[in-house]
Amino acid sequence: MGNEALLQLEGVECRYADQVITTEIHFVLREGEIACLLGPSGCGKTTLLRTLAGFAPVSQGRIQLGKSVIAAPDYQCPPEKRRIGMVFQDYALFPHLDVRTNIAFGLQKSTLNQVQIQARVDELLAVTGLQALAQRYPHELSGGQQQRVALARALAPQPQLILLDEPFSNLDVELRRHLGQEVRSILKQLNMSAILVTHDQQEAFAMADQVGVLYQQKLQQWDTPFNLYHEPANRFVATFIGQGSFIAGTLLSHESVETELGVIVGNRAYPWQAGTCVDVLLRPDDFVLAPENGVPAVIKYKQFAGSSTLYGLRLASGTCLEALFNSHAEYECGQSIGIQVRAEHLILFAQEAKCE
Ligand SMILES: Nc1ncnc2c1ncn2[C@@H]1O[C@H](COP(=O)(O)OP(=O)(O)OP(=O)(O)O)[C@@H](O)[C@H]1O
């Protein structure tokens, strides 16, 4: 993967009339990287994507693609000159054109001659596995096949960047997973940089090298899926990404904290003094069963999930937690089990109030 910065956003703000939709957006996408924009409905993911594509203006800051500034308050490079390809949720294929002609569409105004255009289309049919379907019309294709045609069409003019706006949301869960992996592998094979908007966290985790979490107009964190999960920048990211529960604790040292589940020692140091009241984020996979010497917890509910089962637990103090255990062991609601914390990543947030 190249290390050169391809796309840089510096303090970007997007507005519709007087309403600020996103503000102070900074991030860098490197060549060959795939990023996902994730966030609650209405947080501005699509608006940001449309701004990158050139369909909406920048009211502050600037966007740089390669060495050129493509958008700033006083300048907007037209969408067709940006070398950015777009793939939409509804595929947006031309119904009266077959697959081959759909893919070739964006090449008609290029400097390529007909032989070169057909060679480029052949290359894309091969890379997307669509050779056998080249003569079909969109209505003769499944949703997944149509989305691959849309991707091939966006890739045909050799853009520098591909934007995908919820590309799999019309597909069923199984196909989404499968196509997500397939699209990732096509993009990686071509060393193509891409930004994808999705609602689906699992999809973002599976597809992206970097994930940007948007909330309350701002980019809360731009990081790898691993870091978002294990090193969330703030409480919002901690609760939005993955599952987890907070329990109260008191710092014993920069990297250990005393809680009702015992002393938890992590792998990073926090700057606060011993005695500081903190909230400890515990993921469901941070717990282990400890029948002999664990802290007693009563099972309030359970959700079977195939290889594992998620248990809703209540401690004697009333604290509620969620823990994930291998589904080979089966426990019933109302039963008391012993648990311990086994977490390498200690995620703490300072409490505002002093604890007793
Ligand atoms: N053309 C428009 N004119 C005015 N406001 C708009 C326009 N398009 C979107 N908005 C508003 O901008 C905000 C962000 O919308 P946007 O579609 O970017 O969010 P999103 O994060 O993509 O949402 P979702 O996940 O539901 O698709 C919303 O409050 C929306 O109502």
Image (cartoon, helix red, strand yellow):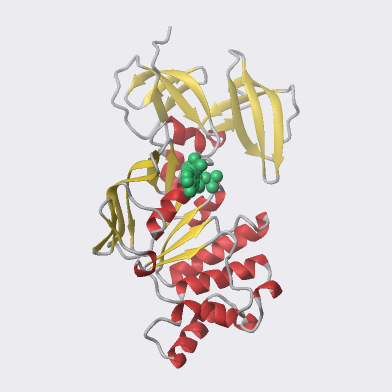
Q: Is residue 94 visible?
A: yes
How far across and how far down the image is residue 176, in percent? 62, 58
- Comparing 116 with 204, the one in front is 116
Instruction: Report the residue at 66% width, 31% height from top.
Output: 311
Name which residue lies at 51% across and 17% down. Answer: 260
The extreme top residue here reads 356
For the question of whether residue 343 can be seen, the reply is: no
Whole-percent x, y for residue 148 in the image: 57, 70
Count of all numbered marks drawn on residues in the image: 0
The residue located at (38%, 36%) in the rendering is: 233
Viewer-closest of 38 and 253: 38
Spot the residue most to the bottom.
115
Judge from the rendering whether residue 152 lies leftward or rightward of residue 99; answer left or right.
Answer: left
Looking at the rendered image, the quarter that the C terminus falls into is top left
Which part of the image, by quadrant, shows the N terminus?
bottom left
Q: Looking at the picture, does residue 251 appear above or below residue 81?
A: above
Percent position of residue 255, x then y: 35, 27
In the picture, residue 355 is in which quadrant?
Answer: top left
Where residue 244 sits: x, y (%)? 54, 32
Q: Is residue 292 above or below residue 99?
A: above
